[in-house]
Image (cartoon, coloured by chain):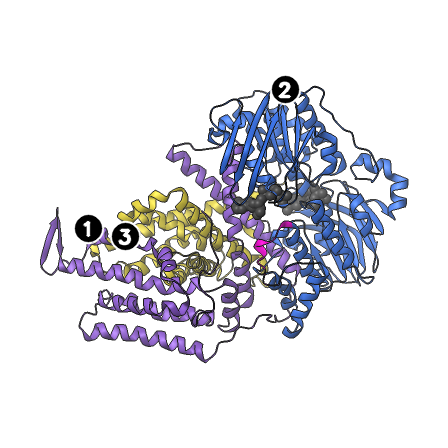
Chain colours: A purple, B blue, C yellow
Amino acid sequence: MTLVLEPVADATAALARRNPVAKLGAALIFSLPLVATLDPLTPAIALVIELAVLPFFGVRYGVLARRAWPLSLAAAGILVTMVLFAADRSGSLLFSLGPFAITTGVVLSALGLVLRVFAVALPGIIVFATTDPTDLADALVQNAKAPARFAIGALAAFRLIPLLGEEWQMLGLARRARGIDAGRNPLAKLRLFGSTAFALLVGALRRGGRLAVAMDARGFDSDTPRTYARRQVFGAADWLLLAGAALLSAGALTASVLTGLFRPIIG
Amino acid sequence: MAEVVLRGFGWRHAGRRAWAVRGVDLTVSHGERVLLLGPSGAGKSTLLAALAGLLPEDSGESEGTVEIDGLEPVKARERVGIVFQDPQTQLVMARSGDDVAFGLENRGVPAAEIWPRVSDALERVGFPYPIGRKTAALSGGEQQRLALAGVLALRPGLLLLDEPTANLDPAGGTLIREAVIRAHDPDRTLILVEHRVAEALPLVDRVVVLEPGGGVRADGTPETVFADLGDRLAAEGVWVPGRPLPTHRAVSPPADLLVRAESITVQHRLSAVSLSARAGEALAVTGPNGAGKSTLALVLGGLLAPTSGTVTAFDEPRPPHRWRAAALTQRIGSVFQAPEHQFVTSRVSDELALGPRQLGRTDVASIVDELLERLRLTKLAGANPYTLSGGEARRLSVATALATAPRLLVLDEPTFGQDRRTWIELVELLARLRDDGHGIVAVTHDDDFVTALADRVQHLERS
Amino acid sequence: MTKYGWRTIDIVIASIIAVTFGVIFWAWNIVWGATETAFAFFPPAQTLLYGVWLIPAVLAGLIIRKPGAALFTETVAAVISALLGAKWGATVIPQGLVQGLGAELAFALLFYRSWKLPAALLAGLLTGVSAAVFDFFAWNAATDLWDYRIPYALLTIVSSTIVAGVGSWALTRALAPTGVLDRFAAGRDRALV
Ligand SMILES: Nc1ncnc2c1ncn2[C@@H]1O[C@H](COP(=O)(O)OP(=O)(O)OP(=O)(O)O)[C@@H](O)[C@H]1O
Ligand SMILES: Nc1ncnc2c1ncn2[C@@H]1O[C@H](COP(=O)(O)OP(=O)(O)OP(=O)(O)O)[C@@H](O)[C@H]1O
Ligand SMILES: [Mg+2]
Ligand SMILES: [Mg+2]
């Protein structure tokens, strides 16, 4: 298993081409309001919208499914939690699991939560699947006025992720070469994990120190204002994307309020 | 154009008692090209970092002065470009062109000028790919050329190169040297650190040798320095060209088979090879960067499972990668290409004691002391392994394997970054082990090592 | 450079801490793949691990010792887990911001002057509180208050105080002798060799 960082979508698709800040903003504008309600209708509408716009981001359904499948594990966890701990046990009794009464209220809440997990997560998954980290950093600096040194510094560290993934494997091998392994003992396994993780951290910080030096050697800390070799434009289409996201999200919420299903998380 | 003046310069790293460099008086004038030499640990890398203004006040203590065109190094950074030994930590961006542009952006070069300067710099170093090429997909030699381009694009008056060809195959090293020659400019001052003098001489017109205790040992044109002091410098560890090296042929024919690999492959990393290693024999594995030598070493060392093919070792029914770690280290010792991967303790002496202690040896202290002494690490016994110089770290990692003296030793680039003296010590230690009946498999780019020790050579090609 | 200005090394090391914990989590899932399934089916147990998520904020604060370090690092950590395909999508970013704010508040309350164990404990505690509050409303709203929401929040806070608070403090002490913190005040107190 390796760490994959490459965008996995068709970069020429209409919405994939939008400014990364616009895409990230749209994802947040669209998904954050969904957190505010517990009903099943809002996330269901949102999911339909998300799946409908997917082709415009150049992401194939199969790719999305592969990225999103760990969510089903979370969904299963939610089901268990709701059976055990649901607050709302109103509605008619469907069946009993030992001491736990499974009512329509429980089922509705659980359904709402499960749908919500998917609806809230998908926009982010779509955006990050279609965005190159370099472009994101550039856009954050040029269009969102993020401080350049912080954005570029984080980007440089980000580039080390695959290297650190390889390093993790090498550290494991090196420990074995030095006569250290855990066998089947879980406690020894945990200790070995801890010591490998510590070595990874030390190695990463050392690399980071050298990287910082190399960056300064090429003038990263000079007082001259930076120029941009790559221009990121934030145009009308990007504003439109943001407005569209806001509108659709408002639409989904309105629908649930109008049907009387809206259930805010506070109160 | 840049002139460098050092007066009584010294630097001591935080956490160290000894000075890394001290008492250096040196003037390098405009356009000179200097080869900086000195035994491993003499402070060459530290000195270059000082010239580049990269020794922050808070990381140690300094004495004397350094001036570049009359300025403090930190203020003269715009005039200085430096390329380090390890290409991976110098590349900042994910795409090759962006990486060259990085320095130009920092210096505020107008956007319209950036891309022409990027392509010009890439052309000068002979970079063969388009600018969109991912930096992660480059070989070590290509990364090193890209790093050089990133520095040349800034048009520095003073160019500093710290072992830029370490870890590269001979072809890759030649490419870098050609790039340096091609980028040569009579207005540019060059200071180069490189252990292998013969290869570096075409690039320079002056040689400066650092004295480990402090000060400058020798200074002048290569001809005069090597004619006057050649023998003495060679004895002190400088790779003076044309000095013969001792060779060690096996004293007896190879004995029993230790490991045999039959058409093993590792997916995407190694295409089918077969080889065997015997007791009392030194086998060298050579080949270009990326041929899969390190991968092969991991498989032979019982650390990586081959995708196909079989490995048998020590007449065991199970392949070594299925053995328990304790059983493995008793028989096969591995030294990794990157020394830092291998350290598991926080003191040099603990690092050496770990293996013998695990084997229940009673003479741990004497084993440790002897290795420290022979590999000139005694003064560093209490240091953290991660703070060693490049050559010191390499010696320590080889010494960890020597300390347990397993029947089979698998070493990946055991001699890189060594001065002449430590190199001879290392080769002698390995020769003695072989003659005592141990088997040695060494992956190497070092032709001298092959000539001095190898009884057999196996060459891998890139698939 | 003023006392509170960020050097390049501060920025890079903060980001590296975030990145490394991303990789450690990735490795955890490979080595202990089974635990995730187990935890998924008994969510309160997840809170035991919760503290590990919060280490970057406290650790970066203790090492870098500048205003914003905790906040910046936890936010970068969140962006990175989103980029690595974490299953929660973009909402981890505001969540990371909120969690970072907790630790940041702790260091600010001490005027960015104290970096000893009590400071680490306070930072672990407050970042745990902020994380617990976020989850209390955002994720656990439909569960029973006394049987689930409150115990979950308390466990999160305890785990954060111990794992992120004490853990980060111990990590800083263990890192100092390795020399990687030489350029930080946190790495200065050690013996010469
Ligand atoms: N970050 C550091 N912290 C503490 N000590 C250091 C550090 N870097 C180097 N040293 C020590 O300073 C001395 C000089 O190191 P330096 O790297 O300059 O040597 P060098 O001449 O480049 O050697 P080599 O040829 O082996 O690369 C060595 O003894 C080394 O252990
Ligand atoms: N952990 C890894 N995962 C995937 N591919 C790898 C890994 N390590 C190496 N490779 C790839 O496998 C090939 C062989 O690598 P290897 O390190 O064995 O070469 P090498 O002959 O030792 O090269 P060098 O002379 O540069 O050390 C290279 O193309 C490399 O990019
Ligand atoms: Mg050096
Ligand atoms: Mg190799």
Chain letter of disc 2? Answer: B
Chain letter of disc 1? Answer: A
Q: Residue furthest left?
A: A92
In contact (CB < 8 Å): disc 3 and disc 2:
no
Where is residue A55 drawn, in percent x and y? 38, 68
Name the amino acid type tagged 3: Tyr
Q: Mark 3 points at which residue?
A: C152
Majority secondary structure of the magenta segment? loop
Residue extent of the magenta highlight: B131-140
Where is residue C161 drawn, in percent x and y? 37, 50
The one of B415 and C142 positioned closer to us in this rendering: B415
Q: Mark 2 points at which residue?
A: B255
Q: In which quarter of the image is residue B71?
A: bottom right
Q: Which of marks 1 and 2 is in front?
A: 2
Q: Nearer the viewer, mark 3 or mark 2?
A: 2
In contact (CB < 8 Å): disc 1 and disc 2:
no
Relative to residue B458, is residue B330 depicted above or below?
above
Q: In which quarter of the image is residue A221?
A: bottom right
Dot 2: what SS? loop
Q: Within the magenta stretch, is there residue B237?
A: no
Residue at image point 42% right, 31% down: A183
Name the amino acid type tagged 1: Leu
Name the amino acid type tagged 2: Ala
Tell me the tag on residue B440: none
Report whether residue A35 is seen: yes
Residue at image point 47% right, 72% down: A19
The Cα–Cα distance between marks 1 and 3, rounded to whole angstroms, is: 14 Å
Relative to residue A58, is residue C188 depicted above or below?
above
Relative to residue B343, is residue B131 depicted above or below?
below
Tell me the tag on residue A84: 1
Q: Share a chain, discs 1 and 3?
A: no
The Cα–Cα distance between marks 3 and 2, rounded to whole angstroms, is: 66 Å
